[in-house]
Amino acid sequence: MPLPNPFSGTKRKKVDVDALSVLNALPDPIIVIDEEGYICMANPAGEAFFGSSTNILRQTAIEELVPFDSPLLGLIGQVRYSSDCVSEYGVDLGTPKTGIKNVNLQVSALYGTSNVVVQIEERTIALKMDRQLTHRGAARSVTAMAIMLAHEVKNPLSGIRGSAQLLEMNASDADRALTRLICEETDRICALVDRMEAFSDDRPIDRDAVNIHEVLEHVRRVAEAGFGREIIFRENYDPSLPFVYGNRDQLVQVLLNLVKNAAESVPEGKGEIILTTAYRHGIRLAIPGSKDKVQLPLEVGIHDNGPGIPAEILPHIFDPFVTTKQGGSGLGLALVAKIVGDHGGIIEYDTAAAGGNFLIRLPVYNFSKMDA
Ligand SMILES: Nc1ncnc2c1ncn2[C@@H]1O[C@H](COP(=O)(O)OP(=O)(O)OP(=O)(O)O)[C@@H](O)[C@H]1O
Ligand SMILES: [Mg+2]
């Protein structure tokens, strides 16, 4: 069954919507810069962001609003030159007046004019950047615990399990049920500790050129052979996608965790998962504490027709031990976030579309540079 399409179905009456009122209703600050670098328009969220009315902003050049070395100025120049849309994550647009303002920027050319539109995602920073950067912190806290657990729990557990097996040999039927229980439960704890041990590995990852379509197909086959047997899988791939600079096994693990979560959330008998890939120009991530940026043009999407993530856990989904499932460990997404972070990529959850929607942005394998 196809995913619900809000645009299909019955014919609806044509409604006139004033574009300006839409712009004014948007919660994200939007400003338009004219060819001389002056702000010629700002929506109310933009006025609030810069703490000035449109009238004052109109007499202000963008250079006066942001520090002279702000990446925003470079992005505006780039868009004027290329007419492309460029995005940059994790930029500080703060001024002494506004304080630190960590934002995502999207800058695009206004078709048919020399003006440039700047969209500032301040609100989503908590969601996007927070997830992308705090998962490193979250992973660190699991790391310490994983090392401790491996020492303090796993070793004694094997002793407990061995003893239970010895007792089992001479036990009555009733007691044997109990020794079995001990073995099963120790196995379960061992498996949990094993999963957590993945976090304690902080060696640099071994990376090469990876065909993400091959990885996606592998994951789909694994899913179809097991937990996703009843689910319809669809693919929407960009066939010209370049290779990812990554570690194949770890990327399999990432996609398997995401597809498994999707499979666990879709309606029984009507489940559908869509795997997508796309090339997005101009997506860059600012590296905190440095002027460097990584280009993240490869986009991999995992979409499902389940209910999506419950709002109350949304800010914490990449933290370890956050789960709504009975018997869930809440380590799946924490591990996904760690691995994506180790690849220098980011993972986002899109709340705007129906269902569950994860997007991973990854760097491209650069043949000329890597093989030099
Ligand atoms: N595609 C999805 N749709 C709806 N909710 C999701 C989806 N993916 C994750 N979640 C929510 O996020 C929570 C955390 O996911 P995570 O994979 O980290 O742990 P888990 O699946 O509960 O347990 P584990 O993966 O360790 O078995 C889930 O319990 C679920 O509530
Ligand atoms: Mg999971």
Image (cartoon, helix red, strand yellow):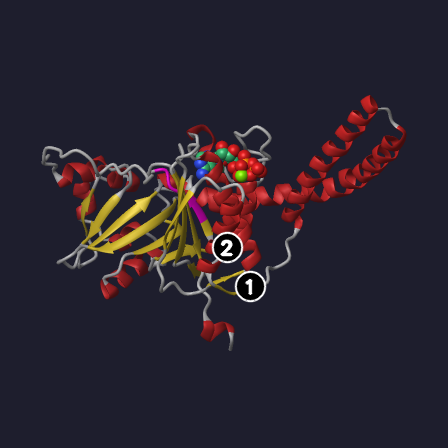
Residue at x 90%, y 29% (from the top left corner): 170
Q: Quadrant of the N terminus?
A: top left
Residue at x 80%, y 41% (from the top left corner): 155
Q: Main secondary structure of the magenta part?
A: strand
Q: Which residue is mark 1?
A: 207
* Kind of residue indicated by mark 2: His
In the depicted structure, whether residue 302 falls above or below residue 322: below
Check if residue 350 falls in the magenta segment.
Answer: yes
Label 1: state its secondary structure: loop
Which label belongs to residue 218? 2
What range is drawn magenta here? 347-351
Q: Nearer the viewer, residue 279 or 29?
A: 279
Expressed as whole percent of the image width and height from the top left, the position of residue 371 reads 51, 75
Instruction: Say if residue 371 shows up in the picture.
Output: yes
Check if residue 160 falls in the magenta segment.
Answer: no
Circle count: 2
Dot 2 crowding, Cα within 10 Å, few <14, some 14–19, many 20+ = some
Expressed as whole percent of the image width and height from the top left, the position of residue 291 reads 44, 60
Expressed as whole percent of the image width and height from the top left, the position of residue 359 reads 41, 48
Q: CA distance from mark 1 to mark 2?
A: 19 Å
Considering every residue shown, the one lying at the far front of the view is 173
- Image side of residue 130 versus residue 191, left or right: left
Considering every residue shown, the one lying at the far bottom of the view is 372
- Image side of residue 278 versus residue 153, left or right: left
Quarter residue 76 falls in: bottom left
For marks 1 and 2 on the same chain, the one whose residue lies earlier in the sequence: 1
